[in-house]
Image (spheres, rainbow, N blue to C red):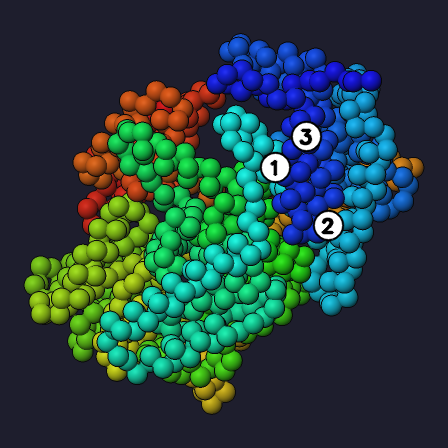
Amino acid sequence: MDSERFIAHIRKADKSEQYVDEHNDQVAELASAIAESYGLAKIAKLAGRHHDDGKNTPEFTAYIRAAVEGKRVVRGSVIHSTHGAILVNELASLKRNSRLTAEIVRTAIMSHHGLRDCLSLDGDVVFVEAAENIADSYESVKETVYQRYGRDFINQEFIDAGLDTHVITKNIQELQKKSKLLGSPYFYLAMFTRLITSIVIDADRTDTACFEDKRALPQRRALDERKEMWKKYLVHYESQLEKLQEGKKTSSLDPYRGEISRACAEFDGGEAGIFRLVVPCGAGKTLAALRYALHTARRYGKERIFYIAPFNSILEQNATEIAKFIGDPDAVLEHHSNIIFSAEENKDKSEDEKRYQLLTENWAQSPVVATTAVQFLNTLFAGQTSCIRRMQALGNSVIILDEIQALPIKVLKLFNGAMNFLASFCKSSVVLCSATQPLLDRVDHYRILPPRSIIENEEKYNEAFRRVQIVNCMKEQGYSREEAADFIVSQLESTRSVLAIVNTKRSAREIFKHIQDKLGNETPYRIFHLSTNMCPAHRSRVLKHLRERLKDTDLGEKIICISTSLIEAGVDVSFERVVRSLTGLDSIVQAAGRCNRNYETSCGIVSIINLRDERTSGQGYLKEAQKATQELLYSIKISPEGYPGGALSKDAMEEYYARYFQPLLEEMAYRLKFDPEHTLLDLLTSNPSGQRGFEEKYPQERPPELKQAFKEAGGAFSVIDDDGKVDVFIEYDEEARKRLQKLREATTLQEKRTALRQLQPYTVQLRDNDWIKTQRTALAPEDGGILVLPPGYYDGEYGVDETLNIEMETLII
């Protein structure tokens, strides 16, 4: 007997209808195709088949018809993501493997429009509560689904899915046999569940978009096609490398750079694993890592290459290089907040923006993705559906993680577990790049699998590229800002340029002022200031002028730059001397990368000073890093023979990390703000709060196999703490004013979003003071708004003057 067919979607353009069974079947096939490389095709197909079962109701049909007709409807008012979860759950037997299959699939189905907890922090089984809410409509939905597919078909798909669950549990057990220090098996179950959720979300959104746009479902590249693509890119890379050598001035370091590059080309670590690339600044790390990635991608037919960087400045610079060396700019997707489309309103530009949005939705259509560490970690742990959706693209890839030492302490155990997951279960090759490798494989728990070194004899290259020495110039009482200014100026007695990097914006501003007052308008000196109180457009302009002055040696000027740490990584500038206020040794090494970069002198000097009264309470674990560095430098001072190579040696760096990490091991599990006794890792594993609540409320009942609080964990996760900060727009120049006017004139939501993106080069993050809080509170809930800095509060030298009582205009959009 034919069952009634209900509507899943209605196309806006021509009012064509897509039936629920048609949509579910296509999502099942898409999900299966995506999941095949993970060995999860059967369980993903089951989740896809039933993800929208709940749309088989007259209520949903009425809801979607009303929405298409333009009537006012409340989004999500008709629940449809629970019915399929109940149906799958009813298929489970009392066997653990069967129950686990049902729980993974029901969690993926219920989470395909937003993460759901398995067990709430209060101890309630979220699935049970959700099932009670749709009890009235479930039986009719169940009857429709069974009439459509038949009981045997539905049961067989569940049995098949159980085979995938068996493989999941077996693989996790094999990983646990390697070491009990690699983290809880429940963490890896959580990652598998999130991955299957990601696959379902992507398949669902893809089929929906293809129906709406009247286009065919995308086909995944075949293995031979992928290998041929990487071969083409590799051939272009090698030709570009030859051209680079031809037009380059020869250097004594060229043979070493060549050795490193060849080692990356020849290294074969297998289909997947975790690797480290440790080369000094100036050794061509990014291009060497790309060469390894291209060879590995071609050898094993990888889906894509990811390049992950901690800062936009590094990302943009290296993404351009990658595009140049593979010879196909369209193949490289840059996904970060600095992507700005022209403000001109014409069809081509709007089409470009639409294409970019489509590519960034799931990362699956681009062979090379260049993105930030924030986007990457959000994909693995954040709660937004847009982030979860992208996770499915990470498998069978080469993932290059640049400047790995810049990861925040709080995410390190989460990161380690996720990298183990990608390398062990997802056939991905993970490359940790840095001159200062943190000891991620030596933490107490959730340590990363021991990385294999791509380069043998790393110390050989450290010696070859050594162009600076670190000098400890700290004083027992520390330097006042005026004394620090005098010390910085004194460095110019025998050199032409000096860069001073300090830990706070206030220190940078005050030292800059002291030097200005000391030197006045003396013509031999040119003084620059850089800090995050300057908007990005302002900083870019200053850096451009700074580079020009550093290159133009004929002027006879002496160059001084006072900066916060923003200049340490990814900024291509070179000074003869660097002064660094006390910080972690890893940051000192980054600062040293700005010294004698172009071999202006036989050996550059990096002087370490300690500022007194420097307020660093809001800067994470800076005090712990300073203490570890100070102790290490003292050890080097009293026993220099134990540290051949001094503070820049591998031994010194390893000792620094051992000292730095030891008191912070508990912080690495991401301590929760709302529950300091527990961590985000707790929420993704045993959920102790939820378990206690369950045992108290339901002492006679068996708890679920999955206890994770996915929604709570996703909501709590944030790579960067921006508490107490607010973005403020700066009317820096005429272009900034034009862009602000565009926002004021915008009428549609899309126009407003585009205009807001245009403002990014002219924004500064400020402390959320009482006046700003009042302004934000005054906004109606349905309003968005930005704050605009009025004239008189922005200085042409150092940016926003936070010492003034700023009252800003609130622009409601």
**Residue type at numbered disc 3:** Asn
Q: CA distance from mark 1 to mark 3?
A: 10 Å
Q: Which residue is mark 1?
A: 203
Q: Which residue is mark 2?
A: 189
Q: Residue at x 63, y 39 (%)?
A: 30
**Residue type at numbered disc 1:** Ala
Report whether residue 302 is seen.
no
Q: Which residue is mark 3?
A: 24
Residue 472 x/y as whole percent: 37, 77
The one nearer the camera, 115 or 716, is 115
Q: Residue at x 44, y 84 (%)?
A: 460
Q: Is residue 523 above or below residue 752?
A: below
Q: CA distance from mark 2 to mark 3?
A: 25 Å
Ranked by sequence position, the earlier of labels 1 and 3 is 3
Query: In what quadrant of the picture does the C terminus appear?
Result: top left
**Residue type at numbered disc 2:** Leu
Q: Nearer the viewer, mark 2 or mark 1?
A: 1
Label 2's element? helix
Ranked by sequence position, the earlier of labels 2 and 3 is 3
